[in-house]
Amino acid sequence: MIVMKFGGTSVESAVAIERLRDIVASRLPEQPIVVVSAMGKTTNRLLEAAGLAVAGQRAEALDKVEALRAYHHAEADRYGAAVVIDEHFQELTELVRGLAILGELTPRSIDAISSFGERISSRVVAMALGAKHVDSRDVIVTDTRHTQAVPLYAETNAKLAAVEWGAVSVMGGFIAATAAGVTSTLGRGGSDFTASIVGAGVDATEIQIWTDVDGMLTCDPTVLPGGRRVKAISFAEAAELAYFGAKVLHPSTVVPAIEKNIAVLILNSRRPEVAGTRITAEGPKSKDVAKSIACKKSITLVNIQSTRMLMAHGFLRRIFEIFDRYETPVDMIATSEVSVSLTIDNTARMETIERELREFADVDVEHDKAIVCLVGDNLRWQPGVAHRLFRALDPINVRMISQGASLRNISVVVAQSELREAVERLHREYFTDVDPEVFE
Ligand code: ASP
Ligand code: MG
């Protein structure tokens, strides 16, 4: 069996659903389990409606629900789904009216509302494919942490094992239920997680994540177009890239699959002929040093220097306590005896943070920076990595460098105005002559 997951854009319209149908039809011998997201931006719209309802804007909330109903009818009635859609919207409307009366949104009611997207889309796609519908709430069992529920694997796997799968089966991603049968969700973007849970549970031979990009690329296309497709990558490399903002998939969602050694493929539903990116626990055997260049734009660099020449101890603790107190994540860090440089992404609380730091340190804040990060499992085996990197970047001014404990990435901070040039130089250096088995 294989699991084929289709995200919101891959089920957003009748045209998209037809594409999905062709793609699934080409994989029938593998007895696919199709996992779908809500159609288009439905989840966002549902949450907006809920927000309006509890804020006392009952009419606006109901208007949003009606607009969603019209959208679903327009795209999905042709599959015979009109009655199913109306039944769901009747229940949804009652729920929104209830929220308007209560004026309060609990995590549990957020899940009740946001589940409707996948409850409906999975029924629609099952009808479009003439496939068996499996309600995810009957098989994915979670704890009671609503909106971020964690699967209970023993219970879930037992239920998955008991399902009589069809030649093709369709399930909604993202949605689940607690042991008591209350609807829960796995967190925003949770459909990838569902695909991975189901794939691991049924021992699928492969998990396919169908999305709207060709897979992972050697560089961020919004910074430098024309990168190569990475055909194969290790889980650790993919996780590192995801952390640095490659939005293709959230690494924690594929853990259940990787633990069972099941390959996860990223594929483009608009260009199914492209072979995508294959993520496996081990990754490909290749001599190439790097797999990809990730970037993070609009970064702020903070240089902190102790005002007492020799701080005995506690300097780092004091610094990080302040960032922690103001819930500001630190991305990169480099330290010496009396100074610390670090980067942050979110500057909302920076003024206060700066004021508190100044009580014991000199602080210098530089805006408009970018992080460029070279990622590859083989980086750790390469002598002279930093030398090669600096030579390739010359004469771009590197404001900070860090090679993390994973040894799988080396990151530099440059001025945002030099980001494109930095990426271009590194791309030329590391991806001009590469293994055709691993890169397109
Ligand atoms: N529909 C859910 C969301 O928008 C889950 C998903 O698409 O993965 O977050
Ligand atoms: Mg998604």
Image (cartoon, grey):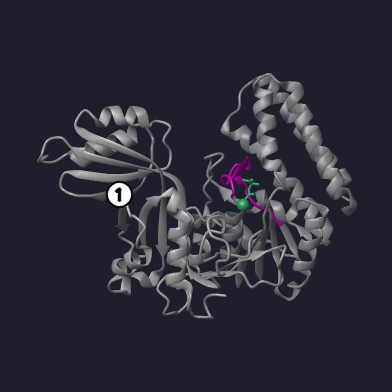
Q: Is residue 330 left or right of residue 11?
A: left
Q: Quadrant of the N terminus?
A: bottom right
What residue sits 33% from the left and 55% below the top?
398
Q: On screen, 249 above or below 64?
A: below
What residue sits 59% from the left and 56% below the top?
192
- Compare residues 169 and 267 and report the one nearer the observer: 267
Q: Position of residue 263 (x, y in %)?
A: 55, 70
Q: Position of residue 38 (x, y in %)?
A: 70, 48
Q: On screen, 418 above or below 187?
A: below
As helix, strand or loop, the secondary structure at mark 1 comes to: strand
Mark 1 CB within 8 Å of ligand 2 = no
For the record, the magenta segment spans 171-189
- Compare residues 103 and 391 and report the one nearer the observer: 391
- Compare residues 417 and 19 and report the one nearer the observer: 417
Name the amino acid type tagged 1: Ile
Q: Quadrant of residue 52?
A: top right
What residue sits 52% from the left and 73% below the top?
232
Q: On screen, 297 above or below 309?
A: below
Q: Position of residue 352 (x, y in %)?
A: 34, 27
Q: Residues within 10 Å of mark 1 (few under 14, many from 20)?
A: some
Q: Is residue 196 left or right of residue 293?
A: right
Q: Quadrant of the C terminus?
A: bottom right
Residue 216 magenta: no
Q: Quadrant of residue 393?
A: bottom left
